[in-house]
Image (tube, helix red, strand yellow):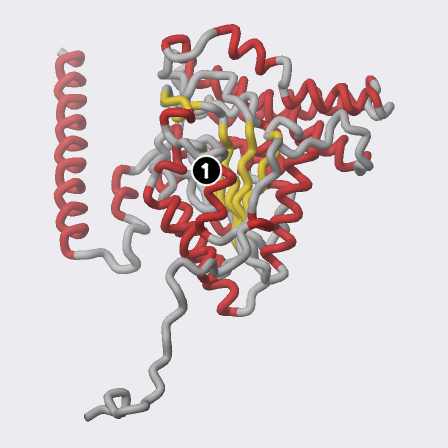
Amino acid sequence: MTVLEQPGAYRPAPPPAWQPRTDPAPLLPDPEPYRLLGTGADLDPELLVRLYGHLVAGRRYNQQATALTKQGRLAVYPSSTGQEACEVAAALVLEERDWLFPSYRDTLAAVARGMDPAKALGLLRGDWHTGYDPYEHRIAPLSTPLATHLPHAVGLAHAARLKGDDVVALAMVGDGGTSEGDFHEALNFAAVWRTPTVFLVQNNGFAISVPLAKQTAAPSLAHKAVGYGMPGRLVDGNDAAAVHRVLSEAVARARSGGGPTLVEAVTYRLDAHTNADDATRYRADDEVEAWREHDPVTLLERELTDRGLLDDAVRAKARDDAEEMAARLRGLMNEDPVLDPMDLFDHVYAEKTAQLREQAAQLRAELEAEEAGAAGNAGNAGEGNGR
């Protein structure tokens, strides 16, 4: 007979399954997106001007990258035109020691964090291993699989906390990514472990051609946070000052041990999903034009003008810096890359597997045979010309 089987033994009762682990009320997002521009709020003039410079550069970056696809210098480009406020704010709220986990549309966030504009386009150009060193600016690899980077952000943040490092991971994802299983797994682990992670959902209205209403029946994507036990924040994604403040508060909360936050930024993708997409097949032009009235660059320009912070000098500097960046990007992207096919087998594993060694040897033999054939053809042509 075990101790628990003895008459009168203490039998601990488990807590009721329905009992909430936390009070849900503080976790609920506001009923309307949080806004600052146009409200007369007390805002830092220096920050507003800094945000403006990045937004102007970001708009020019999107235009230039889109043009590069038409010139054959990029295979594809997912523009973030209309979403620049989210991209810039995500980059500027982080400290140097923090990590940014972008999705494929977030090249602008990587550039705003300090990455070389051409390197940010490496993946979309076809360069090996995403085209940059993630450790240089603490930016995880840009990749096209949806939401797979979210668990990585949670894992890095959890590991940093276990090591005692004062690090926050900010992970960016689109509304389409919230329908992926990786989104659920990342938020669940983050909340249970209370990791220093901030999730930024850029709700731009469409997952390629699928509108949000066909993805979820939730009141908002920010409401999904409550089910995991973390706060949800709803913010106007075209209000650069508001996005910066909400993300700053979330980062500060994560760094102080308060756990993760899910931020939904309501914005709009003005351009097509990529240069290979025809957006007119699933949305009307008048819808796009209505959102142009809520353009993040225009909103900030209006605010700066009202506050007397936007003069010809500020405009000229922002424009000149943006053009200088675009010219440098054109120059770098017009250089044909020097590619070695054997690089395919480097940096996959710390020590090459037998299969990788076999594949590398096979490719090397094919390349040498091709080179020898080309040399022979050149020699034959020379002999023919000599006759």
Q: Nearer the viewer, residue 237 or 7?
A: 7
Residue 308, percent from left and from top:
87, 23
Left or right, 300 with reference to 152: right
Q: Amino acid at mark 1?
A: Val
Left or right, 161 with reference to 55: left
Left or right, 68 with reference to 250: left
Q: Nearer the viewer, residue 270 or 350?
A: 270
Q: Which residue appears at 27% of the width and 91% of the height?
A: 7
Q: Nearer the viewer, residue 369 or 7?
A: 7
Q: How many marks?
A: 1
Vertical placement of 95 versus 302: above or below? below
Residue 279, percent from left and from top:
41, 13
Most distant residue in the right direction: 308
Residue 65 in sight in this render:
yes
Q: Which residue appears at 13% of the width and 50% of the height?
A: 358
Disc 1 on helix, strand or loop?
Answer: strand
Residue 206, percent from left and from top:
42, 23
Q: Which residue appears at 63% of the width and 19% of the height?
A: 295
Most distant residue in the front direction: 8
Q: Characterize the local packing of mark 1: few (<14), some (14-19) or many (20 or more) Cα atoms within 10 angstroms.
A: many
* Residue tagged 1: 173
Vertical placement of 22 versus 180: above or below? below
**Which quarter of the rendering shows the N terminus?**
bottom left
Residue 137 in sight in this render:
no
Q: Quadrant of residue 305?
A: top right
Q: Quadrant of residue 382?
A: top left
